[in-house]
Image: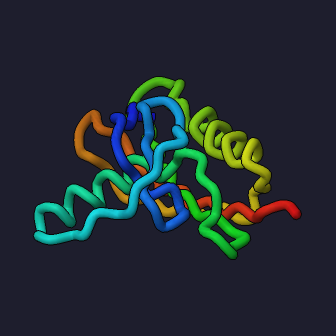
Amino acid sequence: MAKVPEGWYDDGSGKQRWWDGQNWTDRWQDPAPVTSPSTFVEHVKAEAAAGSHPRPAPNGMSYVVLQVILKEKLWGTGSGNLTELERAINGQAALGYRLHTITTASSGSKGLGGGDRIQATLVFEKLV
C-alpha cells in the first residue's frame, strides 16, 4: 500500500482527524467546507488514500465500509495483496469490528507492465 501522507482526513465520525502518516492521533477538527472543484478533487483523493486505514463507525452506526485498491503484478509474484487485506482486517479487528462482507471488482489494466487493479470493498460490523 502506498504511504498516506500526514494530514486531516475523515475517519468515519463526520469530523476530521489528524493522520500522522502511520496512525490516527487524538487531534480532531470540524470538516472544512468544499469551496471549489479543485478542492473537491483533492478532498476525494485524500479520502481514497485514507480509505483502507482503520477507522470507527460514525456515531450511532454499527458498520464501517473500507475500500482497498489491490494491484496485480504483470510478471512474477509477490503483489502483497493478501498482506494489504490482512492489514485492513486486523486494523478493524483491533477497533472491535469483524469482517461482514467483502466484494471485489476489476478496474482494468494500467497498460503494458502496469498489471491489473482490483478494488476490494470490505464491510465491517461492530461487535457488541
Q: Depth check: 78 or 95 in front?
A: 95
Percent position (x, y) of residue 11? 51, 55
At horizontal 70% and vertical 61% (from top left) the residue drawn is 124
- Quarter that holds the N terminus: top left
The quarter holding residue 13 reads bottom right
Which residue: 40% across, 28% down?
Answer: 75
Vertical placement of residue 108 versus 116, above or below: below
Closer to us: 107 or 128: 128
Q: Is residue 90 left or right of residue 127?
A: left
Question: Measured from the top left, where is residue 84 in percent x and y?
Answer: 57, 37
Q: Which corner quadrant of the image does residue 7 belong to?
A: top left
Residue 76 appears in view: yes
Residue at the spot x=60%, y=68% of the render?
Answer: 58
For the question of whether residue 104 can be seen, the reply is no
Q: Is residue 101 left or right of residue 17?
A: right
For the C terminus, the quadrant is bottom right
Spot the residue most to the right.
Answer: 128
109, 128: nearer the viewer: 128
Residue drawn at point x = 72 percent, y = 40 percent: 90
Q: How many marks?
A: 0
